[in-house]
Every structure is written in C-alpha cells, then in structure tokens.
Amino acid sequence: MSKDQELFEMLKGDSEHWHEWDDRPEMSPFETCIHCGVSRRYGEKKYTNPNLTTWEGFGWLRKAMRGRGDWFDFLVWLGFCQPFDSQEATLKLFDYFTPTHFRAAVDDYFQEVQIN
Ligand SMILES: [Zn+2]
C-alpha cells in the first residue's frame, strides 16, 4: 500500500474510497474499479485517487486534517502554538509547507501520536 493510500484510508470520508482497478481482460480497452464498478479507458485520467504530493492532494489532505478534532493539537505538535501572535505568523504556517512536506508531517504525526 502506498503512503498516499495509507493516509487516505485513515482520513477518508464515509463516501470516499480508494479506487483499485481490476486486471482488465486481455484486449479490453477498459479497466473497472473492484470496489465501485466504475470503468475507464485504460490509462485515462479519470476517477483518480488523491496524489498527496500535488497541490490538489495537499488540498484534500489539509481538508481531511482540518475535519478532525485534533487539528489544533496537530498545529501545536508541528511547533505552531496557539494563539498565533500575528496574522503574519499564521500566513507563514501555510507558506512553509509544500505538498510533500505536509504529507510527511501528517505521516510523522500519526506515527508519533498513534490515532485509533
Ligand atoms: Zn472505485
């Protein structure tokens, strides 16, 4: 299981799942998700899973983390104490991260804090 899938499985919403594609029949131009049954042309960029090292994936991961009850615990764990002393400090938090750094931080947090 990839790191992206591992984090996705921990944080996904009730209506979300990680698409996994069947071994398409020989000569078939289509592949089908073994969980929800959607089909796509082989190689088509449709029904893709979040890539957490892209900005789009960063958005997914940030939203998922903010939806948890320990968002501020996470920020404090990262070293950003609440309350932030200035708007500048708050903005700095988001300037600091890239998708790759943010994914690594979330992973480290879960390794250390041990979620349910
Ligand atoms: Zn699916």
Image: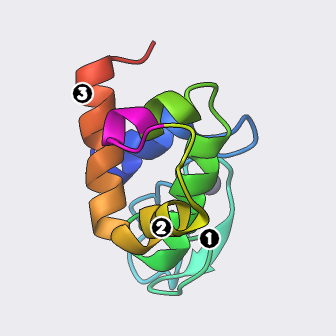
Relative to 66, does residue 112 appear above or below in the rendering? above
- Residue 47, numbered label: 1
| Segment colored magenta | 76-81
Q: Earlier in the sequence, mark 1 or mark 2?
A: 1
- Mark 3: give few (<14), some (14-19) or many (20+) Cα within 10 Å: few
- Residue linked to disc 3: 111
- Residue 94, numbered label: 2
- Mark 1: give few (<14), some (14-19) or many (20+) Cα within 10 Å: few
Relative to 43, does residue 81 appear above or below in the rendering? above
- Mark 2: give few (<14), some (14-19) or many (20+) Cα within 10 Å: few
- CB at disc 1 and ligand 1 closer than 8 Å: yes
Task: Choose top left, top right, bottom left or bottom right for residue 26.
Answer: bottom left
Report helix, strand or loop for mark 1: loop
Q: Quadrant of ligand 1?
A: bottom right
Spatial CA span between label 3 and label 2: 22 Å
Number of numbered markers = 3
Q: Nearer the viewer, residue 69 or 41?
A: 69
Residue 78 on the magenta span: yes
Report helix, strand or loop for mark 2: helix
Q: How far across and how far down the image is residue 24, in percent?
A: 44, 68
Q: How far across and how far down the image is residue 39, in percent?
A: 64, 70
The amino acid on which the numbered mark 3 sits, given as a three-letter code, is Gln
Q: Earlier in the sequence, mark 1 or mark 3?
A: 1
Task: Choose top left, top right, bottom left or bottom right for residue 56.
Answer: bottom right
- Please state, as top left, top right, bottom left or bottom right, where the N terminus lies in the image: top left
Residue 71 on the magenta span: no
